[in-house]
Every structure is written in structure tokens, then in C-alpha cells.
Image (cartoon, helix red, strand yellow):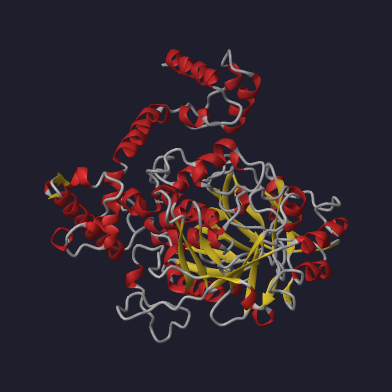
Amino acid sequence: MFQFPKYYDVIVVGAGHAGTEAALAAARLGCKTAMLTQNLDTIAQMSCNPAIGGLAKGHRVREIDALGGIMGLNTDATGIQFRMLNAAKGPSVRAPRAQADKKAYQYRLKWILESAENLDLHQGNVASLFIEKDAVRGVDTTLGLRIAGKSVIITTGTFMRGLLHVGLQNQKGGRMGDSLSTLSDNLKDLGFEVDRFKTGTPCRLNGRSIDLSKCDIQEGDADCPRFSYVSDNVKREAQEVHTLNDWGDPLFHMEQIPCWTTYTNEKTHDIIRANLDKSPMYCGRIEGVGPRYCPSIEDKVVRFADKDRHQLFLEPEGRHTREFYVNGVSTSLPYDVQLAFIRSVTGLEQAEIIRPGYAVEYDYCPPTQLHTTLETKRIGGLYFAGQINGTSGYEEAASQGLMAGINAATKVRSEGPFVLGRDEAYIGVMIDDLVSKGVIEPYRMFTSRAEYRLLLRQDNADQRLTTKARQLAGLLTDERLAIYDQKIEELKKVRKTVEKGKFEGLPLRKWFRRPENTYDNLPRDLRGDVPTEIWDLVEIDLKYDGYLNRQREMVARTQKMEKRKLPEDLDYTKVSGLKREARDRLQTIRPATLGQANRVSGVTPADIAIIAVWLEKRN
């Protein structure tokens, strides 16, 4: 075994959306960081759809950006279409979504990683972890290379014992064209619980073979809703061929590429039903549980038999490719069946499949084995992030990678953990759900999972998180902090104007509470030259003031439970009165606070009351 001559603070295994955020966060915090991946040419590859954001997902991308992460800024720099979903609905459920140029996104981020200070890239396949005295000390690769370090973050995506299915044919791999990882075998040997999930992807088509005249066009928003709070500083230098959007140029005009929609029909469904015996999912070849909220087309046809059609979205994969992603037909049926049902769809009668859809089974580790920092309970200095924790989606992975990278770095720096509460961020909701409740299917974030979603809007992510993030020296750039400070000053000025101003005989504070009154109805001298995003924030706060105060009161009440720490050595088997299910779950998960214990599946309010009494007696 040859040991690499450099010793690292943080080693990141994997270079997908979780791995890139983890590595960049640790490096920004001053840690000597190594990123190790099977193939450096697939860094940050969008393995599935060419889009970032969406309902609850867009919220987290803005949170990632507010914490100094790269996903939002890179999307703004390489996006080809931008939309605000639910724009006509309440502010808590509005969410930005963008189509990205798949290759530009990937290669621009690869260049950022290669250029980052404190970060080294390595190509290799990790076979096992190097452990001493219940703490991780590095990784060993299949080529006999040992890379040593103080902490390791595992972000393996779907690659751990990945198995790809197209019809009744299968092959090993974490993604079509890539090899698998056997690291989960080593994790089992180390005592980790390992289980199996399944996901899938649709076929891709050559755009020249699609008759778009038969499809409905879906344009982007004229006023592009961007993800990053600092995208105005994106400059397209001559050599930066993968920076497509020059938001820093006041003359820049975004030429968006449309998406298109069409529908399946009864003929499509008949073809699928007639070939279910060739589906590995329906004939027992696939053992992993799939995502309920992103079902395959086979599932849709069987489970929603009363529907005579399903909507499909034709999404272009970039400015310099004719490849289209067919959103809505994730499938593992044989190639010939895929071709037959695709060609039964209006507009796709002559479609050429250039990549078939497939299902992939992979190993994951139930996330109840983690602390809220994403460090494993079993081995010190070892962190899991992304699909290894049973989640699905780029945004879920990136959020976890960012938090794991921050916490690995703060531990190396002998600082306290960086944890976000359920009242502070969707990221906090997700991680608390994972470590407290576990998963029975691939986890996907929805706004309905957040009990304080009016506080956790996509428009105020920086106000919620940037002040918290600036406490960690290096996490945020001086440029980002200056932009944030300027925005806060503008908000203060507008709020002062509202406090003192009157219009139509009413104080502005009361005037804004009328649903029909919006800031653009104000005269120019009252509005001033303040950016519309500032007025938007002030208006939302005024119109929803009562609801916001109610949620703040709820937060204050629950904080009492969140602050009540549970002893790390608490033996729940000796707390009399607890139900057996509660005792077993609590003994396994070992929640850090009474509030977290309250969210553990199988634990009732009566169990919490018993633990609270026990704590009082102990104190």
C-alpha cells in the first residue's frame, strides 16, 4: 500500500452535487481538502434531468447560495431557461426552477474545483476506509493507494453496488457507462446497516426527430428569477466558454430556450400494459424500493389506470446539443418497447432514441445512523451526504454535502457543530427528518414537510442564513458579505419609509395590508430607486404580518423542547413507563434533544412526558 505524501484535513469521496459542495465548503474554511472520484470527466454531472430547483428544491438552492455554496451561482451562469413556479400563489410556495445547459454546468464547475485554493483532485475508486480506534484516518483505493486525513465525507450517489436494468437485461454500474463502487461491502464489515433503493431515468431523444409543431410550447419568464444573490457579479471572460450568461453586463439579454409539452394516450398505455411481464420491476427482478413521488411510466399506467393520458415535458439539454430529456417517462422496459410507446405519443411519431431509459438499484445507509451534523455515530470523523442517506434529487444531495463539508471543517478547526433548525431552513427540516425519522423510500423535500414554511420562503434565504454563516470565517467571500450588507441597509431604509409614510389617507403599514394594494401602485417619489426585490420583501412581511407572528410564537414554544439536551449515555431501557416501540426507537436513534425525540417515529406525546419527568428527577 502506497501512502500519498500529503496529509489532508478533509477527504471527499465522490464528485457529484453533494461532493462538490462538501469539498468547496471545507476548502473555503481553510482545510486541506482532497476530492476523490472514479472519473474526473464526470464531476457534477447531471445524471438525470437537466434542471435545478422546483417546489421546495428551489428554496434549498437559495439556502445553499446564502451559505456560500456554488449550485445556485453555477445554475445562473449556465441556465438556458428560468421560471418562478407557483408565481400566482402565496409566497411560501413560490419556487425558482431553471433548465441548465448540462455540459456547461458540469465543465464550469469542474474548472471552479480545479481552481479552488486548498483543494486537490484525485481520480480513483475507494475500496475501503482506513480506521483506527473507532475513528476514520483515510481511504484506500482499488489501485493500492492510501490517502490519509482527519475526516472523510462519503458522497457515492447511486454507485454503491449499482445495478442497471433495461428490460430483463442488467449490468453493473452506478450510471450508464460508469463502473460501480463496492464501498458498501466495507461499510457492512464496519457494522453499518446497509439497505437498497431504486431510481430510474427516461430515454433521451434527438431533437431533430421531434415534431415540435404538434407540441405545446413552455416559455421561460421574461424577468428571469435567478438563484444566486451575487449573480450580478458573474462576468463572462473571453476564455470562460462555459459561462453562458453574463449577468454582470448591464446590456446582457438572456435568450431563453423553450421547453415543450405533449401527452401519452391510450395506445401508449396499451403498449406498456402489454409488456409489463418484461419490466424488471413487475417481474421481481428489482428488490429496491423506488421513489413514490417520481414514479416510472409503468407505475403511472398501473396505479392511475383511470387516467387516459399523462403529461410529458420535452426539455432541451443544452445550447449546443440536440438531445432532449423526456420528463415523465422514467422506465426500465426493454429498448424495443420504449421505442414503440415513445412513437405512439403525439409529436414523437418519428422519434430517435439516443439513450434508453433504465432503472438503477443501489445501496444506501439508513440515515438514523447519523448525528445532525451528518457525522456517523459509529465512527468518528466519518460523514455521509447525498443518496447514501436515502435521499433523491440534486438539491437534496447538494444541501447535505454543504452541511457535511462545513461540519467536517469545523470539527478539524475544533469549533462547535453547525446545525440548522427546522425554523431556520428547509435544509434543517430535511436533515432532522432523515436522522430522526429515517426513510422507507427515497426522500424528497416538499414544502408541506416544513411546519414553518411562511418563515422559510425562497426570497428571504439570505436574511435567515447569511448572518449565521458569516460567523464561520472563510465560508462567505468578502464580495458576498458586502452585497448582503448593502441589501440589509436598503431594507432598513424602505421599512423606515413605510413606518413614517402615508398614502390615500392611511399609514403605509395599514395601506399595504389591503390585498389589492401593492408597492407598484405607490407614486414614484414614495417608491424611490429601490430595487423591486426589496419592496417585494417588505410587502410580503406587511401583508402576512399576523401569520408570520403566529409562526414565530410557535417557534418560541417549541424552542423549550429543542433546548432540552438528552444525555448521550441515556439508557432508554431503564426509563420505566416507555412503550417498547418508543424505547427501541430511541435507543437506536439516540436523539440529541427532547424536541428531536418528539419527532422520532413511534414516539408519542406520552413517551415525551415520561422522559421529561425522568430528566427533572435526574436534575
| Residue closer to the observer: 289 or 298 | 298
Give the quadrant of the N terminus: bottom right
| Relative image position of residue 548 (x, y in whole percent) | 33, 39
| Residue at far bottom of view | 238
Report whether 562 appears left or right of 354: left
| Residue closer to the observer: 588 or 560 | 560
| Relative image position of residue 469 (x, y in whole percent) | 35, 52
Give the quadrant of the C terminus: top left
- Looking at the image, residue 49 lies above or below residue 189: below
| Relative image position of residue 488 (x, y in whole percent) | 23, 55
Q: Is residue 376 visible?
A: yes
Report whether 615 appears left or right of 392: left
Q: Is residue 162 visible?
A: no
Report whether 516 appears left or right of 92: left
The quarter holding residue 602 reads top right
| Image point (36%, 35%), residue name | 551
The quarter holding residue 147 reads bottom right
| Image point (12%, 49%), residue name | 501
| Residue closer to the observer: 135 or 91 | 91
